[in-house]
Structure formats: structure tokens, C-alpha cells
Image (cartoon, rainbow, N blue to C red):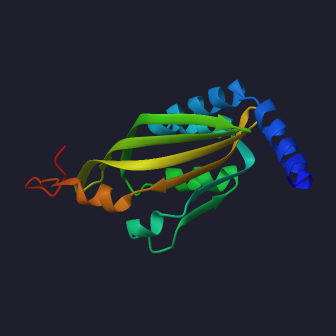
Amino acid sequence: MNWYAVVPLSVVLAAWVGARADPNAVDVADQYLAAYQRQDLDRLEELYAEHARFLDPTSTQAGLASGPVAWSGRSEILRNLRATDGTTVVLQYDILRKFEHSGVVVYVADVTYRMVSPTQVWTGTTPVITIVTVEGTRVTEHRDYTDYTTGTRNAVVEERGRTGNGAADR
């Protein structure tokens, strides 16, 4: 038997077994996700750390001209969340699995969305993995891996009609 291999493995296993979940991180992440679903920007501003990051490396599938979402800093994140061009976004996470380790909370979910623009209404459901990193009482990172292919394929798009005077119907 190779004792020199057993000793490092036992140290790693002892550290892993001794690690505990951080209930505070789960609580902060749950509060954050609830505010994110409501697009409660005032609450999000309270929860984001000054140096927070918001990332979605899969967002290039959504046809964003600027490439994947990679926003850094509380003010840039909030500025981008506010910049909706008249589109209202409502999200509802159906969480299938949630786990936490070392302040990193992972949500595996199906997200039902409704996006209302001046000319269209998009509704649908898509799989997503959202990872929220918490330090203390602040969110330092939001990272999404979204299945935009499924979300686009399953979307129902309704054109918003126009009245005779050109104003969008409600």
C-alpha cells in the first residue's frame, strides 16, 4: 500500500467532512433571488456588494450584440437591470434543487418568464442554473447558465396591437 497517497487523501477528506453549510449564505441568497424575480431594484441595491459581478456566459445564445453578459460593480449591474427599453420582465423560479457550500448557493430551476415590450409579449419556461455567491450579508456574484435554445423554442410571442391613433393597446 502506498502510505504517501493515503495521508494527503485523509487530510482532504477530513477537511471536506468537517465543512458545514452556511445557513446565512442560503438566507441571503434566497432573499436575493426573491428580489431578483420581482426586479426589486431597491432591494437588490441593498444586497449587492460594491464589487459584485453579474455573469451569464450563455447569453450569447440570446442574440445579444454585445456578447455575453459580464457586468462588474453594483452600479453597472443596476444600470443594466434598469435599462429595459420599455420592457417589463417578470421571472418565476420553480426551484428543482438547491445546495450550498462555502457561501456558494446553487439553484437548479425552471424559470417561467413574461417579458412585455411596447410591441410584443414573450412568455415561456426555460431551464436555468443560477449560482449566487455570498460573503457575509452581501451578494458578490450572480452567475446564470440559461438554456436559451429551449427558452426561445418554447416561447409564445404575441404581437401587441395598435389602435387607430398609433398608441399601443394595453
- Number of on-image labels: 0
| Residue 116 visible in the picture | yes
| Depth order, front residue of 35/16 | 16
Residue 83 visible in the snapshot: no
Q: Nearer the viewer, residue 170 or 128?
A: 128
Q: Residue furthest left?
A: 164
Residue at 38%, 46% (x, y): give it: 89
The image quarter containing residue 133 is top right
Which residue is located at x 27 percent, y 48 percent? 124
**82 relative to 102 in the view: left or right:** left
In the rendered view, tell whether residue 144 sits above or below residue 137.
below
Q: What residue is rendered at 88% in x and 49% in y?
A: 8
Horizontal relation, residue 119 to residue 18: left or right: left
The image quarter containing residue 118 is bottom left
Q: Is residue 133 above or below residue 167?
A: above
Nearer to us in this view, 119 or 63: 63
The percent coordinates of residue 13 (x first, y second) are 79, 40
- On the rendered structure, is 112 left or right of 167? right
On-image quarter of the C terminus: top left
Q: Give coordinates of residue 65: x percent, y percent.
A: 45, 74
Determine the residue positioned at 75% across, 47% down: 50
Residue 140 position within the rendered picture, expressed as x and y whole percent measured from the top left: 71, 46
Picture coordinates of residue 112 (x, y %)? 33, 42
